[in-house]
Amino acid sequence: VFDRDSLLGAPGLLNAYRAGNVTIANAPGTGVADDKAVYRYVPEMIRYYLGEKPVLRNVPTYLGGDEVDRAYILEHLDELVVKTVDGSGGYGMLIGPVSTAKERTAFRRRIKKKPREFIAQPTIALSRMPIYLEELRPAHIDLRPFVLSSSVTSVVPGRSEEHTSELQSRQY
């Protein structure tokens, strides 16, 4: 859109979007707050902007740019998942419990050099679900949608862990 010499994108897409002729799933500007450091403040944003108590618990998020948090991160590299604030897809992460001393030393240097670029979180168990990719096999996921498919396909809302276990035990 912004570089006419670029081979990326679709010419005219932004004009079609502005005219209301196209819906874009991740519309321009939606990445403005896509910084993992913002995640730490989501419960406070919910309270402030919505005047509500957050329904879901937030994973504790430590900011490399905060002196106290940074000290905690550096002392607990072997226990935490460390991510760059602008990364995605699981690239460039340190998964402390399975990392080597050499990897932790490299991350320690990077964090000290540019602390604002990193966050850390405790490791959490991701959900698993079957996927079909040339064969049926398990896969880790961080979002568990429930899709019921027969003559009609429906996406149903997620529920509490008790309800989730109940749904998983049913045959549809």
Image: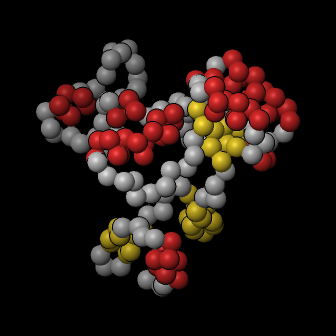
- Examine the rendering and report whether any part of residue 91 can be seen: no
Q: Is residue 148 left or right of residue 16?
A: right
Viewer-proximal residue among 1 and 112: 112
In percent of width and height, residue 103 lies at 80, 33
Q: Quadrant of the N terminus?
A: top left
In percent of width and height, residue 118 lies at 61, 30
Establish if 68 lies above or below 131.
above
Residue appearing at x 69%, y 25% in the figure = 111
Viewer-proximal residue among 94 and 40: 40
Establish if 143 lies above or below 11.
below
Q: Residue 152 occupies which quadrant of the picture?
A: bottom left
Q: Residue 135 occupies which quadrant of the picture?
A: bottom right
- In this view, the residue farthest toward the bottom is 171
Viewer-proximal residue among 18 and 40: 40
- Examine the rendering and report whether any part of residue 126 can be seen: yes
Residue appearing at x 19%, y 27% in the figure = 15
Q: How is the image coloured?
A: secondary structure
Establish if 135 lies above or below 66.
below
In percent of width and height, residue 142 lies at 53, 55
Viewer-proximal residue among 53 and 65: 53
Residue appearing at x 36%, y 15% in the figure = 3
